[in-house]
Amino acid sequence: EVQLVESGGGLVKPGGSLRLSCAASGFTFTNVWMYWVRQAPGKGLEWVGRIKGKIDGGTTDYAAPVKGRFTISRDDSENTLYLQMNSLKTEDTAMYYCATCITAPGSFDSWGQGTLVTVSS
Amino acid sequence: DIVMTQTPLSSPVTLGQPASISCRSSQSLVHSNGDTYLSWLQQRPGQPLRLLIYKISNRFSGVPDRFSGSGAGADFTLRISRVEAEDVGVYYCMQATQLITFGQGTRLEIK
């Protein structure tokens, strides 16, 4: 069974940093593209960024609002995805989900339960 | 960036009646490989996000056949043939042809 479990959320002051983790299991992690998606309270889904699998170079892409502040990485030996968030702003307050596509091309067929990040003074 | 526009944003429906949600993209979602990466997701209160439909019309594993997707190019529709109480929630279209973009979400509620 595919499982994605996020952790690392919490309360942080504006300008602060936080690192989220997403532990993956139930599939071969190394070559799977992994994604972060967020949802501000009462709002819709927003794509944050992605990291390609090892076979595709492991490169990253980011949404404009987080580019230069957030960094996605992965540890294939630990089957874990990371999101390093720096220079946090109040508008980064959201539930952060990791997601991926295992069997359904061009979609997110597997989601974590999310971890809440609150940026507030 | 591709912009996804859903209508309506709220849909009150009678149990047992059909419902449909429209999703339009600001440009064609046909990928250079010929596929169209348009999917539909469901978010129910207290439940994880759930994939319903991928590549326009392919029902994901375990999704009831009352859910169907159709469309082409930049114009897509999710239909529920007979709404059940468990269908209450928010529905999102998502494109993955060029990075990722979501529609604003459509809230399905029972009249």
Image: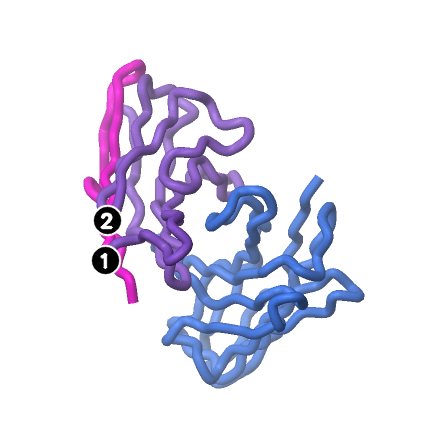
Q: Measuring from the top left, give residue A20's x and y in whole percent.
A: 62, 68
Depth check: give the residue in front, B88 or A111.
Answer: A111
| Residue at 36 percent of width and 58 percent of height | B101
**Residue reaching furthest to the right:** A77
Q: Give the residue pinned by disc 1.
A: B27
Q: Is residue B56 left or right of residue A52?
A: left
Give yes or no for contact between labels 1 and 2 (Cβ–Cβ under 8 Å).
yes
Q: Mark 2 lies on which chain?
A: B
Secondary structure category for the residue under label 2: loop
Q: Is the magenta stretch mostly helix, strand or loop?
A: strand
Count of labels shown? 2
Q: Give the range drawn in magenta.
A: B1-25
Q: Does the magenta stretch include residue B68?
A: no
Give the distance between the C-alpha atoms of the residues marked 1 and 2, in whole angstroms.
6 Å
Q: Mark 1 lies on which chain?
A: B
Q: Measuring from the top left, give residue B95's x and y in whole percent.
A: 36, 53
Give amino acid for label 1: Gln
Q: Give the residue pinned by disc 2.
A: B74
Q: In which quarter of the image is residue A39?
A: bottom left
Depth check: give the residue in front, B51 or A14.
Answer: B51
Q: Is residue B4 magenta?
A: yes
Q: In this view, does B63 lie to the left or right of A81?
A: left
What colour denotes chain B?
purple
Note the chain letter of the blue one. Answer: A
Q: In which quarter of the image is residue B40?
A: top left
Which quadrant of the rendered structure holds the N terminus of chain B?
bottom left
